[in-house]
Image (cartoon, rainbow, N blue to C red):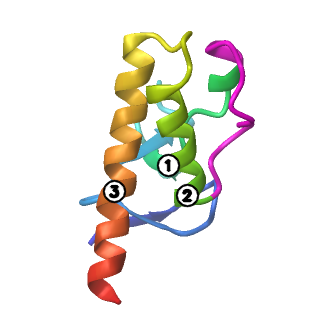
Amino acid sequence: MDTQFCYVCNDVVKLEVDKYCYKPYGDGGKPTEETKYRHFWHGVPGITRAVGGGGGFNGYAKTLEQARQRAEYYIQSNPYAAPEVKAGEQAVLDEVNRLEALDKESN
C-alpha cells in the first residue's frame, strides 16, 4: 500500500484508502517527490476567517474529535456557512465516521 506521512500530525496517510490533500512543490502543481500530504479530516486552517469566524476553531483539527466538532458546527450552527462549505465539512464528517468505525473494528 502506498503511504506518505501527514505534514500536520506525522501519522501515515494511506493513499489508496484515506481521503487526503496534498501540497505540490516543483513540477507546475503536479505531485512530485517533494509533494507534502495531509489527512483530509484536518480540514482547512483558514476556514474560521473565511466563514464569519466563531466556533472557537483555529488552524488544522489536531484530532478526529476536533474535526467532528468543527464539521458539526459548520453544518449545523454557523449561519454564514455557504452550501459548498457545508458540503466540504460533510465530507470531513463522513471521513471521520469512516475512520472511527475502522478504529472500533480493530479494537
- Is residue 51 covered in magenta? yes
**Stretch in magenta:** 49-62
Position of residue 52 relative to residue 6, above or below, is: above
For the N terminus, which image quadrant? Answer: bottom left
Q: Are marks 2 and 1 in contact (CB under 8 Å)?
A: yes
The residue positioned 65% from the left and 44% from the top of the image is 60
Pointer 2 residue: 65
Residue 44: tell me if it is visible.
yes
Instruction: Give residue 25's position: percent from left, percent from top.
Output: 56, 37
Q: Amino acid at mark 3?
A: Asn
Instruction: Determine the main secondary structure of the stretch shown in magenta.
Output: loop
Q: Amino acid at mark 2?
A: Glu
The numbered disc on residue 97 is 3
C-alpha gap between disc 3 and disc 2: 10 Å
Give SS at disc 2. helix
Left or right, 105 with reference to 80: left
Depth check, front residue: 10 or 68: 68
Pointer 1 residue: 68
Position of residue 16 relative to residue 72, above or below, is: below
Left or right, 87 with reference to 67: left
